[in-house]
Image (tube, rainbow, N blue to C red):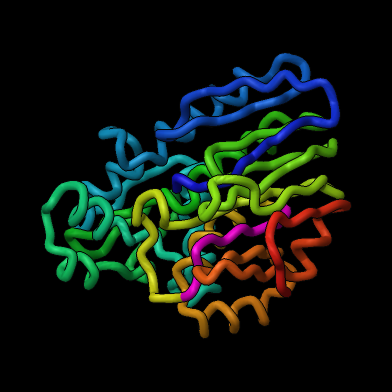
Amino acid sequence: MPIILILLLCSLAFSKEEVFYLMGTYAIIDLPDGKNYQAYRYMRSLEEKLSDYIENSEVSKINKNAGIKPVAVSEETLEVIKKALYISQITDGAFDITVGAITIRAKRWKELSEEEARKLVDYRQVKIEGNEVFLTQKGMAIDLGGIGKGYAVEKAYQHLKLPKGFISIAGDMKVWGEKRLLAVYDPTTRGVLMEGINRKDLCLSTSGNYFRHHIIGEPNSLLQVTVAYSDCTITDALSTAIFAMSDEQRRKFLKEHQNVGVLLLYTDGSLYFNRAFLDYFEMVMFRRSEGN
């Protein structure tokens, strides 16, 4: 998802970050031992499996065979789909990768009307058996745009096993083994909403609909959501889900999941942040009046 996090203002140590084009946006990578390009190549290999914009990707093959037959996929594709279905369950469908019926088949390819496509959005119709994935109805499609970037960041971190580093793709980032000055974008001023120094390893993901209306959900009072947690796959998916929830759904979800850090910017300009969010930082400064 093209999101809006100012991922890095500056480093507290000597920085050697590099910028790469990845997943339709830009990745910033700052790793020791000259590992930046290795991380990029690994995440690019994930994109080649997960992107619905790549004709022969595993996700594209699943979509082409919707309602026809199961498709055998790699361990990585299977893992991210399983994680996506888990997020769908705990968010009561606010996050749903089968939104691809709308985003891909209706909006991009014009194969279906949006009304027809909405009837095909149902994560419960994604069936997994062994290493095979099957969409049970023709016209269904998987869109991993709300989870894929965070998953790639998290997998690169796990794959490289480095003592410290920083990796971001658009609005999804992870910093570990070091402290950095980080900032969250303010879409109302095009400046900084919040900046802080991380207390511990963390992932941040930010979602909003102000650049393009790509998140499909319930009417609510939110302008932007930032989620802080230890796993970037989770933060990416939850920032999308929370943004898509109604106000009532969101209040219920956050009450039940108080270990998930959130910073919410409302359409009226007010802010909400919880204790779990602040716990990830040793210093935080907000650029407007805040409430919590």
Magenta highlight: main SS: strand
Tell whether 244 sits left or right of 6.
left
Which residue is depicted at the point 51% across and 80% down? 247
The residue located at (15%, 68%) in the rendering is: 116
Q: Position of residue 213 (x, y in %)?
A: 34, 56
Q: Is residue 40 above or below residue 72?
A: above
Residue 120 falls left or right of residue 243: left
Q: Is residue 35 magenta?
A: no
Residue displayed at 53% across by 65% down:
87
Q: Is residue 229 magenta?
A: yes
Above or below, 191 relative to 235 = above
Say if residue 150 shows up in the picture.
no
Q: Position of residue 62 (x, y in %)?
A: 29, 48
Where does the image place residue 146, in percent across and percent down from the top left? 46, 53
In the image, is residue 276 above or below residue 37? below
Q: Using the image as rendered, state which of residue 241 and residue 123 is in the foreground.
A: 241
State the image coordinates of residue 223 (x, y, percent, origin top left).
49, 64
Q: Is residue 42 above or below residue 157?
A: above
State left or right for residue 26 relative to residue 215.
Answer: right
The magenta stretch is 221-230
